[in-house]
Image (cartoon, coloured by chain):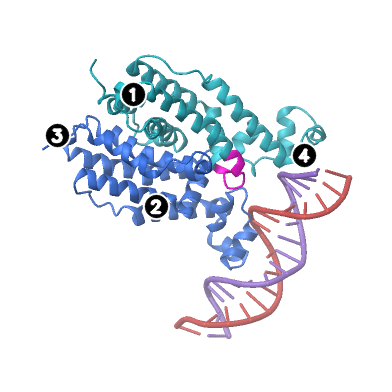
Chain colours: A blue, B cyan, C red, D purple
Amino acid sequence: MQVFLRHGYAGTSMDRVAAASGVAKQTIYSHFQDKEGLFTILIERITIQRLQTELGSETLQGEPDVLLRQLAKAFLNKMGDEEYLNLFRVVVGESVRFPELAQLYSRIVVQRGRSLIADYFRSHPELHISDPEATAHIFTGSLVSYIISQKILYGEQGVALAPNRIVDALLQLILQNRDSG
Amino acid sequence: MQVFLRHGYAGTSMDRVAAASGVAKQTIYSHFQDKEGLFTILIERITIQRLQTELGSETLQGEPDVLLRQLAKAFLNKMGDEEYLNLFRVVVGESVRFPELAQLYSRIVVQRGRSLIADYFRSHPELHISDPEATAHIFTGSLVSYIISQKILYGEQGVALAPNRIVDALLQLILQNRDSG
DNA sequence: GTCTATACTCTGATAGAC
DNA sequence: GTCTATCAGAGTATAGAC
């Protein structure tokens, strides 16, 4: 898995996989059909595993300004992890060759997170959010694209943009229309 | 170039490059140092070329609600183009192996677009945007992540989210605090 | 055309489970 | 003693960089 995440599908040789996992090549081929099957199952496994690690699918509760800020921070932390970045890189990089994996990732990670937040927005009508789904996308999307531009495209070595500024601006936009009561 | 964009770096053979470009392999090696050099120069070239096609680096002008909507639509159109999607896939997928390319992409495409919009926000104080740079990131980032989730991760085949809903929600958030005059 | 890398297979040997 | 899983390595056919 580490090898695939680091070198991508085409850049990974079965010899290296065997060496890294400490087993004989033959053993791998007795458990998995071929390279493609191994890759597919590994990515599937780690993607689903990520879901459980991340959001225990609990419903979100708490004061909007506190909870949303906390959520944003947790989100940035999780996605900033090197293993997570590599998973994203591989899924995006191989999305043409392995569209089912990309779709799995989309369903499991992206859509799940978005609807969790959308539900939260729906349960807080005082925020006056007319389209919770779209607003939830803006919330998560701003954070995802921040990680992409800073950590994946190494934009932080150019003009760095502090994470707090994104979070502050985002919360200001989302909360500015709520009832004062 | 088409071959690299479609199959990634490791997945591209020089034989195929030669066949696709209609020249002999030897000719390629007489013009470029090696596979890595060819790849680097091609991606550099198309990235820079994209900049000019996209935003002629003109300053943005016009009424916010009109201009921003128009800008968002144009943005979604450009990024939804298949060649553009493939460029993004390759740059992200190879960002560990070719960090300079990722950074070039970040500087040329991401940061340039962001500061163009930030400048526009700065020139419209009636919008009361306290952090133009961060807000510009939210604007572009929401659109980029929309394209990623819909077109790259094929999320549109799951729960589709109409582009208009994103744009509407985004404009509502950004414009809701402006002076009525 | 050359030389290397790679996906995948075949063989024979080793070791533990019952 | 048989069965099953594993291992190490040689071997094949093909693709690929140059």
Determine whether the residue tagged by mark 1 lies in a helix, strand or loop. helix
Instruction: State the separation of the CA atoms marked 1 and 4.
Output: 47 Å
Chain bearing tag 2 is A
Please name the residue shown 26% across and 23% down the image. Answer: B178
Instruction: Tell me the magenta residue range.
Output: B93-102
Measured from the top left, where is residue B106 in percent x and y?
53, 36
Q: Residue furthest left?
A: A181
Residue at mark 1 = B164
Please tell me how crowded label 2 is: few (under 14), some (14-19), or many (20+) other residues with Cα within 10 Å: some
In the picture, measured across the screen, residue B180 lies left or right of residue A6, that is: left
On the same chain, marks 1 and 4? The answer is yes
Q: Which mark is residue A78?
A: 2
x, y percentage for residue A60? 23, 48
Q: Secondary structure at mark 2?
A: helix
Image vertical order of residue B128 relative to residue B105, above or below? above
Label 4 crowding class (10 Å Cα cut-off): few <14, some 14-19, many 20+? few
On the image, the x and y values in percent for residue A138 come to 33, 35
Q: Mark 2 to mark 4: distance in Å? A: 40 Å
